Amino acid sequence: MINFYRRYITNCAEIIAPITELTKNRAPNNVEWGDRQEKAFSKIKRLLSNKPMLKLHDLNQEFLLQTDASN
């Protein structure tokens, strides 16, 4: 789920670093879930569930639409 939303979460890689460290190459099969991992998990959970990360634009305001015409 995080991978889908990570582009909308500022500093996502930094926030979840304690968790991703557990899945690196050479990481042991039995991982130790510590305070750092719990804090990262709680923070990312809060960011995903508290307020909308995406919202509709205000149609009363001027906006710019950029498109990509490549294949």
Image (spheres, grey):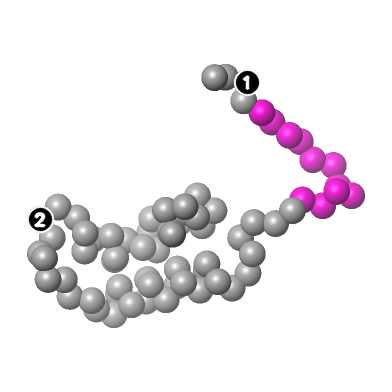
Q: Is residue 36 left or right of residue 6?
A: left
- Identify the element where label 2 is drawn: loop
Q: Which mark is residue 26?
A: 2
Percent x, y of residue 48: 52, 67
Percent x, y of residue 59: 85, 48
Residue furthest out toward the top: 70
Q: Tell me where residue 29 sits by quadrant.
A: bottom left
Amino acid residing under circle 2: Arg
Q: What is the magenta segment's predominant secondary structure?
A: loop
Q: Is residue 26 in the magenta section?
A: no
Check disc 1 and report the residue beneath it.
Answer: 69
Q: Are marks 1 and 2 in contact (CB under 8 Å)?
A: no
Q: Is residue 62 in the magenta section?
A: yes
Amino acid residing under circle 1: Ala
Residue furthest out toward the bottom: 35
* Extent of the magenta region: 57-67
Q: Residue shown at 46%/72% (left/top)?
A: 45
Q: Residue shown at 50%/55% (left/top)?
A: 5
Crowding around mark 2 (Cα neighbors within 10 Å: few <14, some 14 to 19, many 20+) is: few
